[in-house]
Structures are given as C-alpha cells and as structure tokens.
Image (cartoon, rainbow, N blue to C red):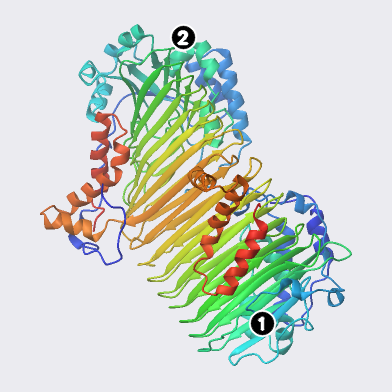
Amino acid sequence: MTSERSDNSVIALRDNAEVAEALGRRYEAGFVTDIETTSLPPGLSEDIVRQLSALKGEPEWMTEWRLKAYRHWLTMPAPDWAKLRLDPIDYQAISYYAAPKAGPKSLDEVDPKLLETYEKLGVPLHERAKLAGVAVDAVFDSVSVGTTFRKELAEAGVIFCSMSEAIREHGDLVRQYLGSVVPAGDNYFAALNSAVFSDGSFVFVPSGVRCPMELSTYFRINAINTGQFERTLIVCEDDAYVSYLEGCTAPMRDENQLHAAVVELVALERAQIKYSTVQNWYPGDENGVGGIYNFVTKRGDCRGDDSKISWTQVETGSAITWKYPSCVLRGDRSVGEFHSVALTHHRQQADTGTKMIHIGKGTKSKIVSKGISAGRSSNSYRGLVKVEKGADGARNYTQCDSLLIGKRCGAHTFPYMEVKNPSAIVEHEATTSKISDDQMFYCRSRGIGEEDAVSMIVDGFCKQVFRELPMEFAVEAKKLLEVSLEGAVG
Amino acid sequence: MSQPAPSPFVAALLDAPLPASGIGWLDAARRENLEAFAAAGLPDTRVETWKYTALRALAQRRFAAGDAQADARDVDLSAFALPGTDGPELVFVNGAFRADLSRLRDLPAGLSLQPLSLSLRQDAEPLRFALAGRYREAGDAFARLNAALAADGVVLRVAAGARIAQPVRLLFIGAPAEADLAWHARNVVELGEGAELALVEQHASSGEQGHLGTLVGDIVLREGAKLRHAVLQDAAEGGTLVRRNSLHLAARAQAAVHVLELGGALVRHELQAELGGDGSRLDMRGVFALRGRQHVDTQLAIRHQALGTASDSVWRGVADQRARGVFRGAIVVAAGADGSDASLANKNLLLSGQAEIDTKPELEIYADEVKAAHGATVGQLDERSLFYLRSRGIPQVQARSMLTSAFCRSVFDDLPDETLREHLFAMLSRRLPA
C-alpha cells in the first residue's frame, strides 16, 4: 500500500512547461448521436408534469404523486450549503423529456444508431452482452431503450425493467416502495426529480433469490437543452442478493446540463444490495465551460435485520457533483458501506460523501473516501454519522484521504458525527497530502515516466475502493482515472 | 432572517443605553454593531456554526443590563485561589472592574496592564484597530453584542523583548444579583516582538446565578513572541457564557493554549487562530467534562496563512447524565501556505444514554505542500482496561472514575507549569463522576 503522507520539500516536476502543454483532458464519450428525438418544450409547470405523465401512459396515482411533488418543490428554496460555486439554474429553460423518436418495441427494433452509441461507449447492450454476463438497461436521454437478458432474469424470478414499464406492469410493487426511502419532498432536487422523472431502472429480487448476474444501467444524455431525471428503485426481499452497476456519459456541450436522479434501495431481512457507480458525465472543458450538474439523491434503507447495503462510487465526471449515497440502518445488525473515489480536475467541483444513520442495535458502517484534486478544482467530502439512542453497540469507522495534485486546487473534509448512545463507537480519520517526492523519485529512478508514475500512485491510493468494484468496472474505473488525470502533473 | 418581533432576549438588551465613550469611532462602531445585532437577532440552528446549539430557550430570557451594584458585591477571592499565580491580576465581578480586588501595583518592567475603561480614557487611539471592527458573519451575534455593549475589559501589553516571569491572571467572577444580568468584557492583548507571557484566564462564580457573560479577546503576537494561555472555566451551574478569543500570530510566534471547561449551563467557546507569519506555531489542548444538563460548544478555527506554520490541537470531552458536548475543529490551509503542518484530534467519552456528543472536525486545504490530518472518535471506556483494573480488586465505580480521569488528564501532560497542572487535575477530579 502506498503511503499517503507527503513531506515538505519542493517537488521537481511542477510548472514544467512541456507537461503544462499537455493540459486538457480527452473526454472520449463526448460525441453527439444524431438521432431524431421527441421532446417536451422547455419549461416546467403543472401542465408539463401532466403531459409528461400522459406521454408515458401512467396511471392516475402516478400523475397525482408527481403533481404533489411538484407543488412541494415550488415551496422549497434551492440549497446553498454545499461548498460549490454555481450560477442559479433556470428551470424553465430545461426540457424535461427527450426520447428517441422511433419508439423501440424490443431490443431488435432499437435504432441501430443508438446501439452504435452504446457500442462506442463500450456498453455490451446486445447479444455480445452474454459474454460479459451483464444484464443491461440503457437509458438514453429520458427513456429506457432496452433491457437485455430479460428471459434469464425472469426465470430466476427477478424483475429488471425500465421504471416506465414497472409503473405500467408492476404498479403495486412500485406504489408500495416508490418514495418510501426518499420521500417526494425530501430535498430540493429529489422533489424536482419526483415531479419530472422520466425513466430509470426497477429491480425486484424476490425472497431467497440470488440474482444470477450483475445488473447494469447505462445512462446517457444526448439531446441539447435537456435535463435527465432518472429514478432507480431496487428492492431485495428477505435473503435476496443483487449487485447493480451504473455508468453515465454525456456529449461535450458548452452549456451546463442538469442531471437530478434519485436512487432508492430497500433491503429486507438478510438481503444484500451492492450498488456500484462509475460516473463520467461530461465535466466541462479546462476553463469550466459546460459540463453536467450532477445533483443526485441516493439512499438505501436496511429495513430488515442483518441486511447490508454497500455503495461504491467512482466519480470522475460532471462539472458539479452533489451526491451523498446514504444508508439508513434500521434493522438490527444491519451493515452500511460507502467506498468512494472522487476525482476533480480543471474547474470541476465535487461535494460528495455519505450519511450513515444508525437506528438498529449492533449496526455497523464503514466509510472509505478517497478524494483526488487537480487543476483548479475543488473536492469536498461531507459526511454524517448519526447514532440514535436505541442503536446499542453501533460501530462506525470512517477514513477520508485527500490527494492534492497541483497548487491551485482545494481538498476539504467536513465530517459530522452525532452520537446519542454510550455504547456506540464512532471513529473518523482524515489525511490530506500530495504525491510525495520520495514516491515519485522511486518510480522515476526505475525508468517510469512522470505520468505513469502519477497514475500508478493514484491507483494505489484508490486501491481500497477499486477492490470493491466488480471486475469490468474496476478496469474501466482505472482507465477513467488515467484519462481524467492527463496533464494534471506539471 | 427577518424576524417579525425581536425576541425577549433581544428586546431586553436593546432597552439598555449604549455605553457612551465620547470617542467618535468607538461610538459609531458600537452603534453599528448593535444595529446589526438587532437586525439579525440570535442565530438559529440553520446557521452552520450554530447547528448543534439551539438558542431558542435563551431567546426567551431577559437579562438586566450590567450590575449597578457590582462594586458592592461581597466576593471571597480565596475561593478562587490558584497556586502559583500571585502575580499581577485583574478581577471583574459581574463584568465590572474591581480595583479593590485586583493586584496592579509593582508591575514587572515591560508589562502594561489596566482595565479597558481606563485605557479608553487615557489614550484610545491604539485600541482603534481592535475595537472599531464590524462583525459580518451570520454566526457573529454575540461578538456584535459584545462590541456594542462591552464597556470594560482588559488591556494587556508586553513590550518587545520583555519576558514576564510571573503569570498574569484575569479573573471573571459571577456574583448573585437581584436579577439575572448580562455583562460583556473585551480584552486586548498584545505581545511585542520576542516578548513572553503566561496568561491565566479564569471564570468562576461566587454563588448561584444565571447571568449571561460575553467575552471577546483579541490577542496579537508579534514576531517571535511566545504566549502560554490557560483558561479555567468553572462558571455558575446556571450561567450562560459565550467567549471568543482571536489569536493572531506573526512570524515565528508561538502560542500554547490549555483550556479546561467545567461549569456553566450553556457555554460557547470560540477560539480563532490565524497563523499569519512564517514559521508560527500553535498548540492547543482542551478538555470539557460535562454533567447534568450542561451544553458546552467548543469551536476551533485555525487558519494557516504563511509558510512553514504548524498547529497541533488535541481536545477531549466527557459527557455524563443529560449533558451535550459539541465540538468543531476547523483547519484551513490557505493557498501559498506551503510547508504547513496541521493536526487535530478530538476524542470523546459518552457516559450516559441521555448524553450526546456532536463532533465535526473539518479540513479545508488549498495548498499542496502540506501535511494535514484530523481524527475524531466517540466511544466509551475500554472494557479491557476496566477488566484489568477490576481483576486487581478495584471496584467498578472507582475503576471507571480512574479511567475517565486518565482520559482527560493526559491532555494536560505537556503543561509546563506544574502547580497549575496539578490544580487543573484537582479541579477535574472533583468534577468527574466519583
């Protein structure tokens, strides 16, 4: 394991003119797919919410649910507590629905251009997916374009489909769980999402079933002037298990696009949910022009005893990330985990972390957060560990490490600890450092180039988190980090 | 934050006339700070720095303005004797300076020490920088109030190069009065280049009362100056005490701060330090031991502004019964403060199911040639240590008390003044659950 400490002597590589020239990262997913889309006109009103709901052929209760959320959203002020600099968002300038015009009936009918897009992104959407053994639900702009491996999953009793379909076909289940973890009025962006969410994934794993393959969703924002508001709901009944992966990209555009998603996880008795994210939304260019505003509410509810929810995230994209995947540890002996790598470069801003709410007895949580800041970016960890009165024997361990690459970036840590039970143990540790000269010298003296050395050291710094990712994602995450850090040294 | 009507707390304070000094800039500053206070009122828990300290109950209380009979209050100083501090001292009773109780004669060469009221009458100009400030942050209500209403306090200066051997004591005593009252003290401390001083700030009570005291101290250390600052807070059980000490360290200046926080019903302690000069160093050690329904909120804010600055803070807290301990330790390393070394540790013991600890260490780093680390824990006594003691025949209660005491005492191990250290230990032992 690489040492995360640094010493104070001057690093030799800084301000190296040649390397500075290499500044500017490649954003490989920055292409636009030229495809006809149907979209609602920009703007937000009760009418738009109704139209959206009608377009999707939703039942009455869903429309009402959305309207209630919308009315509540109108009463809420936009949050300003995060350590982020952003201009006010004009919610009337955004189109809340964009769908590829040729509505797909099945995977075979999906517009080949779309499939091409996903192929460029490396999403194994089609039959090739079999080789990868990953079932994929892909969301393009606002709607789900296809879900693979339905049959195999159905045999196991697992429901994996788009949220729109779930509302139509599994209305009772959706109605039972939707909004039960993240209520419609939970926060500003969750309320907005509840009103206008367009699609997303729905996963239901019945009692005793271990989902036979990894489930995956790929999100892509393509159309101009659209926001993406997807909603994911995963329910694991008693003794069930699922591992779910999520990836995201967007084309390079000059304006900021809004992404406000909500993810809800429900784990009943002894159920386990593993949720992994590789977030690579377009981060904007090196001057901070364009990029996605990523305001996401993710929360897991360990409702049953001995259940477990584990969040793993690799955040390299987005101009602004505002995201706190949380665990409500309600069941006795339930376990929450959060493993995160957040990398910011150029002018990116990230304010991310987690909340662990210990309610049940003997609950445990573990937080490992690795922040890497480069360029002129700002990277904050913000976390809450709360132990309620009844959480006898609760245990939390938090480790936050920050790595600074360059002189003009910032790395911040804001952990909150609130403990009301005397038998709980809560620990937090954080360090901030830069890549040490010793480490660089060691690598360089062995003939390893500057960039490779940095990437090796960063990889070591993140290893604890990468270990938690499913294999394909770990490889992708590592590559993403390399690309994202290009030109950071110097 | 627009409030329809000022709370009883604000209304009562606004009724009182501002202290008039006849000094234009000072009266203007007082007026503006009072206006700012009246406009914003007390902060609510949505203000980040007041997140864990609700002032709703305080806002409903009324405090009389100052104590007209402060000079006549009978106070037995021997009850607050501190062994080893028989040097210069300034005593305030209910915020009013008591010349009869103070010891200001035969001050050592290089030390100038007098009440603020006297300094203002003699030559106010040197105090302008410290007293003409405006407070603009949302959480600054009490600083504004203090700036508006503090008519007295301490002005302490140490001449360049002077090393003051005897510790200087500042004693703030709350005495029972006809009604609960509010007092405000303002301290201005300046150590010249290479000067050295040991300062003891003591808060005590000569009987049950529920006064509100606010204290704002500006402490400036010029190049190479060294300050040892000990704070012993054992205010009245029903008292409310809000203190803010701001430290400014020039190049190579060093400050060591030791704080023992025992008394008060509602206590807020803000310690703001700016390491503004290259190579300056700050060491802070603190303990709060709480019981009953005490609420003690400690807020450390350390700012590294210059090259090669160092700060090391260790804070420990014990909360028993229904007490609530709040701790925030924020470290900022500004851009360009290369070679900074910042560390902060906060450990807490939660001894009761009704008690609560809220802790929030923060790091904000804008420079990369730095070492910065912080840690915080909340837990209980180590079962194995308890078992070890019990297996050697020490009863449970005593074993717990020994371990709790050891947990707190270790923080003061590096206090160089042995008599003071022993006194702190004794105060602590009396306080901890037996």
User: What amino acid is labelled 2 in the image?
Assistant: Glu
| Residue B232: quarter of image | bottom right
Report the disc number at residue A169. Answer: 2
Looking at the image, the residue that sits furthest to the front is: B393
Report the disc number at residue B255. Answer: none
Please identify, in this view, whether the residue under mark 1 or under mark 2 is nearer the observer.
1
User: What amino acid is labelled 1 in the image?
Assistant: Asp
Report the disc number at residue B86. Answer: 1
A334 and A285: which is toward the camera: A334
Residue B344 in the figure: left or right of residue B396: left
Pinpoint the chain carrying mark 1.
Answer: B
A76 and B292: which is toward the camera: B292
Asked if the residue at tag 2 contacts the one at tag 1, i.e. Cβ–Cβ closer than 8 Å, the answer is: no
Q: Where B84 sits versus A218, above or below?
A: below
Residue B131 in the figure: left or right of residue A482: right
A178 and A422: which is toward the camera: A422
In the rendering, at what x and y percent does residue A352 appear? Answer: 44, 43
Q: Quadrant of the C terminus of chain A?
A: bottom left
Residue A326 visible in image: no
Q: Of helix, strand and loop, which one carries label 1?
A: loop
In the rendering, at what x and y percent does residue B387 appear? Answer: 51, 43
Tell me what residue is drawn at x 37 percent, y 52 percent: A377
